[in-house]
Image (cartoon, grey):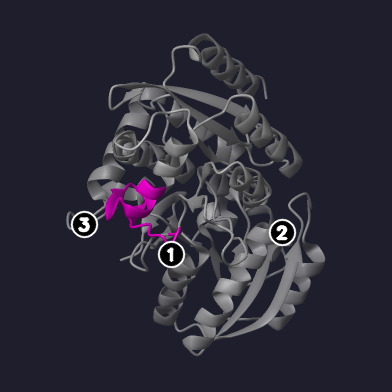
Amino acid sequence: MKFARTLIAAAVSLAASTAALADINVGVVLSLTGPGSGLGIPMQKQLQLFPKEIAGEKVNLIVLDDASDPGKGVSNTRRLVTEDKVDVIMGSCLTPVAAAMAPVAAEAKTVQIAGSPVGTPPGQDQWLFRLPQSNNVMAHAMVEHMKKQGIKTIGFLGYTDAYGELWLKALEPEAAKNGMKIVAVERFARSDTSVTPQALKLTSANPDAIVVVASGSGAAMPQMGLVDRGYKGKLYQTHAAATPDLVRIGGTKVENTFVVSGPAVVGDQLPDSHPSKKAAVDFTTKYQKAFDAAPNQFAGHSYDFAIVMEKIVPMALKKAKPGTPEFRAALRDSLETMGRTVFAHGVMNWTKDDHWGYTNETGVMLKVVGGKFVVEK
């Protein structure tokens, strides 16, 4: 907690000291405290390596803590668009928070680049783009792996919020298309400390595999509950669980778990032909050197955010000056037309009609072996 407050204070202090000189204002909303801090703090650390200047223009990062709370995310966003008058917003790393922020950013006609796979009703994401892979893309990779494992029946244990719901909606058609059946669905809240009733029901249903849909440090608890209740089948986790916290908290109870992920944190294990190998290795090498610690995949989204800005800012500057509605619109247009762009997390190609952008080839299946993530061959 003290470390998080120090980061916030340093970031705000930096913003205040340079705001007068900054040419491009970037608002950042992350969960630096609360249940989502395991995702937000690594993203904030990576932003310490963010370029101080792009295309000859100074860049001013204004970092705010949403405390893992949608309401705080909304108030932060209102401050960024009304007081700081930012050109673009990055965040949040939590789906419910990012979803709450989206209408405010859209009303202000300011681009929001979310660090979470947030969904919106059709036609309501004109100003919203996502850095993580969509649940549809990740469900495709997961079900492809399940086919190889001979899985026919699936159990689902996921959050009651938008992240859990969107994953269920992505998994159901993908499983049905491949001859698999979801035989039991159980849900739990992010704040729950036990899933014993849900684990008993799922264990009783005895599916070939169970998909656990949770994030960060909260992903281990439900899986440990399933193991404690005697479940012996295969266990799958989503890309929000691909962090060291899963292994640190889950220990031997998460061994052999399959985790779908982007390629960012396993670049050294990818074949040379993989398009993201170079970017992924660059990301992990620089993070390790700067912080003497291994990054998680969420830090990779901040790395990719820098790639985005270095590509779209020069394009937007040809149309308008920072700090104007025209520049904000030009940034959005540039995102929709920047074309194929290699990220540490895969190959992105946002268009006017697709603000998710990743292709089905993006997902990588990992397996926890000896307490480490190993790419499945």
Who's the residue at 33% across and 38% down the image? 319
What residue is shown with label 3? 271
Mark found first going from the N terminus, 2 or 1: 2
Disc 3/disc 1 C-alpha distance (Å): 32 Å
Q: Quadrant of the N terminus?
A: top right
Image vertical order of residue 52 relative to residue 352, above or below: above
Who's the residue at 53% across and 51% down the image? 128
Q: Position of residue 80 (x, y in %)?
A: 61, 30
Mark 1 is on which residue type?
Answer: Asp
Locate residue 197 relative to residue 251 in the image: left or right.
right
Q: Secondary structure at mark 1?
A: loop
Who's the residue at 47% across and 53% down the image? 132
What residue is shown with label 1? 353
For disc 2, the neighbor class at 10 Å (few under 14, some 14 to 19, many from 20) is: some
Given residues 312 and 146, the one toward you in this image is 312
Given residues 191 and 256, the one toward you in this image is 191
Magenta range is 333-356
Mark 2 is on which residue type?
Answer: Asp
What residue is shown with label 2? 161
Image vertical order of residue 41 relative to residue 360, above or below: above
Who's the residue at 57% across and 44% down the image? 93
Q: Is residue 21 magenta?
A: no
Mark found first going from the N terminus, 2 or 3: 2
Mark 3 is on which residue type?
Answer: Pro
Q: Is residue 233 something that shows in the picture?
A: no
Check if mark 2's residue and mark 1's residue have beta carbons within 8 Å: no
Q: Secondary structure at mark 3?
A: loop
Disc 2/disc 1 C-alpha distance (Å): 26 Å
Q: Residue furthest bottom?
A: 179
Q: Position of residue 175 (x, y in %)?
A: 52, 82
For disc 1, the neighbor class at 10 Å (few under 14, some 14 to 19, many from 20) is: few
Q: Position of residue 90 (x, y in %)?
A: 52, 39
